[in-house]
Amino acid sequence: MILTCIIIEDEPLAQELLQDYIYKRDDLILLEKFNNVNDFNNFKDKEVDLMFMDIKIRGNVKKDVEELFTSNSSIVLVTAYTIDQLGDYNLTLVDNVLYKPVSYEKFNRCVDKVFYEITNKRINHAENKN
């Protein structure tokens, strides 16, 4: 199985690091990178399996970010903040969190976990259809 993914990250070095990690895996396809949530809004009609997203990005509006959490995509927060420091965001729909600085080992563990979760969702969905 191959997952499509995007990056929403305003720090160029963090964005580049995530891109490099994605390119090292044969099971991920990077569709696009965004510096802010507003740029992503023009793209959100496309199907994306996995979003790597920094929640504290310049110009983000809490409402716009929380709308992303209701999408069908799996979301991995990439942040330098602890969950407690993120305060009043509704993070119940976030699948995983990667804390900066992100090592390739942690990235791989997180992606493997997402693959497992998505595979189980698809199996359960197929079983419920029958």
Image (cartoon, rainbow, N blue to C red):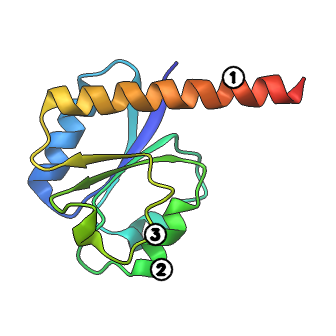
Label 2 amino acid?
Answer: Lys
Within 10 Å of disc 3 (Cα), the crowding (few <14, some 14-19, many 20+) is: few
Picture coordinates of residue 71, whole percent (x, y): 58, 56
Residue most extreme to the front = 84
The spot of residue 54 in percent (x, y) is: 27, 60
* Distance from the alpha carbon under mark 3 to that under mark 2: 10 Å
Is 11 placed left or right of 63 in the picture?
left
| For marks 1 and 2 on the same chain, the one whose residue lies earlier in the sequence | 2
Element type where label 1 sits in the image: helix
Location of residue 56 by image quarter: bottom left
Question: Which of the two residues, 108 or 27, is positioned nearer the viewer here?
Answer: 108
- Real-space Cα distance between discs 1 and 2? 32 Å
Residue mark closest to the camera, 1 vs 2 = 1
**Number of the label disc, if any, that sits on residue 28:** none
Mark 3 secondary-structure assignment:
loop
Q: Does residue 85 appear to the left or right of 93 in the view shown?
A: left
Q: Look at mark 2 in the image and give the residue it sits on.
A: 63
Closer mark to the observer between disc 3 and disc 2 = 3
Name the amino acid, label 1.
Ile
Q: Distance between the residues labelled 3 and 1?
A: 27 Å
Classify mark 2: helix, strand or loop: helix
Residue 89's image quarter? bottom left
Type of amino acid under label 3: Asn
Q: Is residue 97 left or right of residue 73?
A: left
Q: Could you tell me which residue is drawn at 28 percent across and 70 percent down? A: 86
In the picture of the structure, the residue carrying the numbered disc 1 is 123
Residue 68 position within the rendered picture, expressed as x and y whole percent measured from the top left: 50, 63
Label whose residue precedes the other's in the sequence (3 or 1): 3
Residue located beneath label 3 in the image: 90
Spot occupied by residue 130 in the image (x, y as percentages of width and height):
90, 23
Residue 56 in view (yes/no)? no
Q: Is residue 57 above or below residue 127?
A: below
